[in-house]
Amino acid sequence: MNEFTLTNANGVEVKIITYGGTITSISVPDRNGNLANVVLGFSNLAQYQAQSPYFGCITGRYANRIANATFDLNGETYTLAANSGPNSLHGGNVGFDKVVWNAAEVESEDGVALELTYLSPDGEEGYPGNLSVMVVYTLTEANELRMDYTATTDKSTVVNLTNHSYFNLAGEGTGAIYDHILTINADTYTPVDDTLIPTGELAPVEGTPFDFRTAKAIGPGQRSSHEQIVLGRGYDHNFVLNRTDDTSLVLAAEVYEPTSGRTLEVWTTEPGIQFYAGNFLDGTLIGPSGHLYRQSDGFALETQHFPDSPNQPDFPTTVLNPGETYRTTTIYKFGAD
């Protein structure tokens, strides 16, 4: 396992380890120029290996959930590991978050960059095809962390890759994210059943705790009695992003933390974003600052295709065929106000 550090002229620093392609730290300035790490994580590799709830990692082959840990493709049924109740989550027992990626520092016109590659063999965790994956992390002088994902396969398969960083813009270890002000560019979301699998409906956010079209604090909705919030133990839902085409970068979400003034913009080419408010953090994990992580001490904004797409024909497809190239880009842009 190796660690790499990307820095820019503004003092922004991103640390990445090859285990899971994991972002272990992102240090960015507040409104007064004071730097702090704004992602949750651990201080040593052993904790990532033994305890991590996907802190900062690359998730795949299929980020999020697949119902009943099975899917059909081209007349064949593929069985996956059921590692989240009856469902498969984030690629199975040994997903991309638990493998060691090959890494190389590369030249980039946009800033300093790290290229990570991994060959997932045919049948790994039940998925078909030898899948060749590349993820390039680039830190720009505009305080953007750009993530470019590509993949190719020699057999039809399904692919859904994302980064699973947990953010707290007040700083890692500072407590709950209830006062963070969130905007999500989505008119609809995908409600879930009691195992957190989408029902197939695209439900309007209007009149619900899921309406983040106008900026509002996370806390009230996270503690609401809405049926979907109860099922997820808080926010753990996919939002259907408003977009006019299938490929352009769109502003998916914005976050503002009032105390520090730090801001985060999430831009993506993906059709969806999973907003997860750290519901399953239970006070048993200790971060690098020495603080326990409790429920809602961090949030994730996972750009993605929709959960369970392999079993939901009305959702955007996640099938990748030989001769095609999977491409997606997400940008985390940091600022202060």
Image (tube, rainbow, N blue to C red):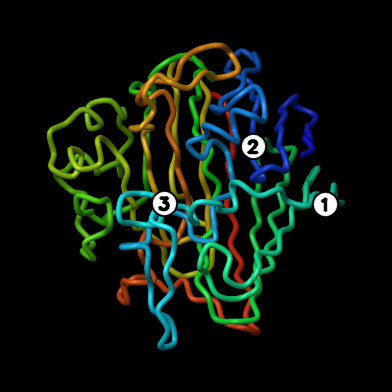
The residue carrying pointer 1 sits among few (fewer than 14), some (14 to 19) or many (20 or more) residues within 10 Å by Cα, namely: few
User: Could you tell me the amino acid type at mark 3?
Assistant: Ile
The residue carrying pointer 2 sits among few (fewer than 14), some (14 to 19) or many (20 or more) residues within 10 Å by Cα, namely: many
7 lies above or below 310: above
The residue carrying pointer 3 sits among few (fewer than 14), some (14 to 19) or many (20 or more) residues within 10 Å by Cα, namely: many
Give the mark, 1 or 2, whose residue is nearer the N terminus.
Answer: 2
Give the mark, 3 or 2, whose residue is nearer the N terminus.
Answer: 2
Given residues 256 and 284, the one toward you in this image is 284
Give the mark, 3 or 1, whose residue is nearer the N terminus.
Answer: 1
Image location of residue 92, percent across then percent down: 48, 55
215 lies above or below 320: above
- Residue wearing tag 2: 23
- Residue wearing tag 1: 109
In the image, is 181 to the left or to the right of 103?
A: left
Mark toward the viewer: 1 or 2: 2
158 lies above or below 29: below
